[in-house]
Amino acid sequence: MRLLGSVHFGFACVLLALAAGCERAPSAGGPLEVEVRFGEVGSNPGQFSYPRCLGSDGKSLWVIDKMARVQSLSPEGECLGGWRMPEWENGKPTGITVWTPPAGGPTRVFIPDTHYHRVMIYDPAGMSPPEGLNQGRGTLLGSFGSYGEAEGQFIYLTDVAVLPTPDGRGIARLYVSEYGGNDRISAFRPTPGQAPGMETEFQFEFAFGRFGSGDAPDPVEFNRPQSIEIDPETGELVVTDACNHRIGVFTPEGRLVRWIGGRARAGREVGQMSYPYGLVLLGDRTAMVAEFGSNRVQRFDLVTGESLGVYGEAGRHAGQLASPWAVCLEGERVFVLDSGNNRLQAFERPSPKRRVGASGDRGKGPG
């Protein structure tokens, strides 16, 4: 009788799952269900010394560590090449953005050179082979920025987001985040006369944000805006405001749409955040957030603010995380930069969120 009851119960669960749109249940935490894991501490290709930048170009992963090495890696962990940043004595980058025009064209690597107060633009086709990784300098196409608090200047840069032109051939705008007193996001446009997809020179357009922890829409306040992503469907900016333990959603012109989380709700319970550093959008109005302070990844609905799952736990074993700095998508996998363990771990991308209505709407830190 117990077996028969179990069969009936299991069949009922299958029917419920089908009625719910075949979505998997949200993860409730615990070790990651790891599909790929690679990396270890060291200075050889494929090894890391406290990596804290992660990006993807749709075919390979890009990592920068505290040796100021930019590595391109296959999704299985093979080092494909890279280079070393030209200066690193003052500090190393904390972000990387690899971008290819949606309509096709050359790939560019944008590196917010955190402690040198500038954005560096590289051609990845010019990277050194793995054996030259530690000496290679990369093919620098351009840079902009200088130290200061004036328009177009930076203190400590953290990330770059690229808004493409409507035709997908070039760059309409760059957004650059920073902390260290400015704690703002600055927008830049390409200087006129550059061929689409080949832009390397930019001019300041506007900025929004100042240092603080308030939740008012004007003026917006940040405390280490660490990561920026652009929702391709809405054009909205999504920002991890790391030391205020929240996510901000903004219009392309910098107007606040909503905050998710905040200091009053900081913590390690489901739906709370502790130093959200890394960010990747899943294309269904949800985001995966790497929480440096909670040693986990959490998925949020960017419309309702609801937590849709927790992935990972603190530790050194497989599936556990130590101070994750970043997260990205590569194919059907979510890769987590497990910085404190000097490795990357990947798990299956969660099921898309079901849409409701035509629009889908329902209603200074460590480092």
Image (spheres, rainbow, N blue to C red):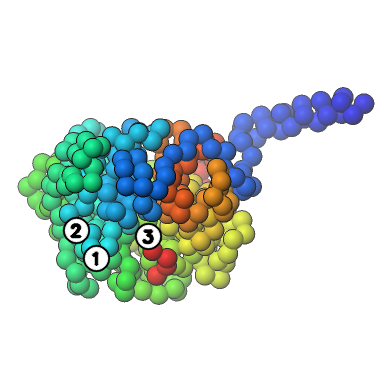
Residue visible at 44% across and 39% down?
38
Q: Is residue 229 visible?
A: no
| Label 1 secondary element | loop
Numbered tag placed on residue 87 in the rendering: 2
Q: Position of residue 331 (x, y in %)?
A: 41, 32
Single out the mark in the foreground, 1 or 3.
1
Q: Is residue 129 visible?
A: yes
Q: Earlier in the sequence, mark 3 or mark 2?
A: 2
Q: Nearer the viewer, residue 21 or 329?
A: 329
Q: Which amino acid type is marked by label 1?
A: Asn
Quick one: label 2, few (<14), some, or many (20+) residues within 10 Å? few
Image height of 231 relative to 305, above or below:
above
Q: Position of residue 140 (x, y in %)?
A: 14, 47
Residue visible at 23% across and 59% down?
88
Single out the mark in the foreground, 3 or 2.
2
Residue matched to label 1: 90
Cβ atoms at labels 2 and 1 below 8 Å apart? yes
Residue 219 is drawn in which quadrant?
Answer: bottom left
Q: Earlier in the sequence, mark 1 or mark 3?
A: 1
Numbered tag placed on residue 226 in the rendering: 3
